[in-house]
Amino acid sequence: MKPSPARLLRYLVIIVIGNALYFIAMPRLPSAARHKRFQLDLGTLVDFWFCLVVFGIFELVDFLRKRNKK
């Protein structure tokens, strides 16, 4: 099943917001949680977590919006 362009745009926005939040927070994070270029490290996992949280917020807002329409 091919995702629609609107869904791809939504995912792109989620990733950009999650990465922006991570890079804003990165100077305040412990050194182990800071991503090093071209390496898979704990920073990569923390960055992914930021994106996952943003995705969860988007999904929660959609769920609440749909629930209130009923």
Image (cartoon, rainbow, N blue to C red):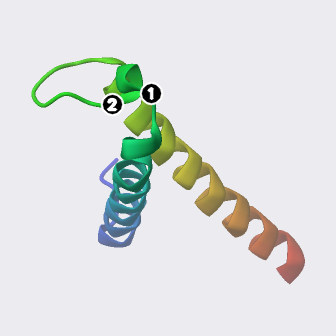
Q: Secondary structure at mark 2?
A: loop
Marks 1 and 2, how far apart at CA: 7 Å
- Above or below, 5 against 60 in this view is below
The x and y percentages for residue 54 are 54, 54
Query: Which residue in the protein does label 1 denote?
Result: 30
Seen from the viewer's position, the closer of residues 7 and 37 is 37
Look at the numbered disc 1 and give the secondary structure of its residue: loop
Vertical order, 17 against 70 (above or below): above
Place of residue 67 in the rendered image (x, y in percent of width and height, measured from the top left): 85, 70
Mark 1 in CB contact with mark 2 (< 8 angstroms): yes
Place of residue 64 in the rendered image (x, y in percent of width and height, measured from the top left): 80, 68
Q: Quadrant of residue 34?
A: top left
Say which mark, if any, is on residue 34: 2
Could you tell whether 52 is left or right of 42 in the image?
right
Mark 2: amino acid = Arg
Q: Position of residue 60 (x, y in %)?
A: 72, 59
Judge whether residue 37 can be spotted in this image.
Answer: yes
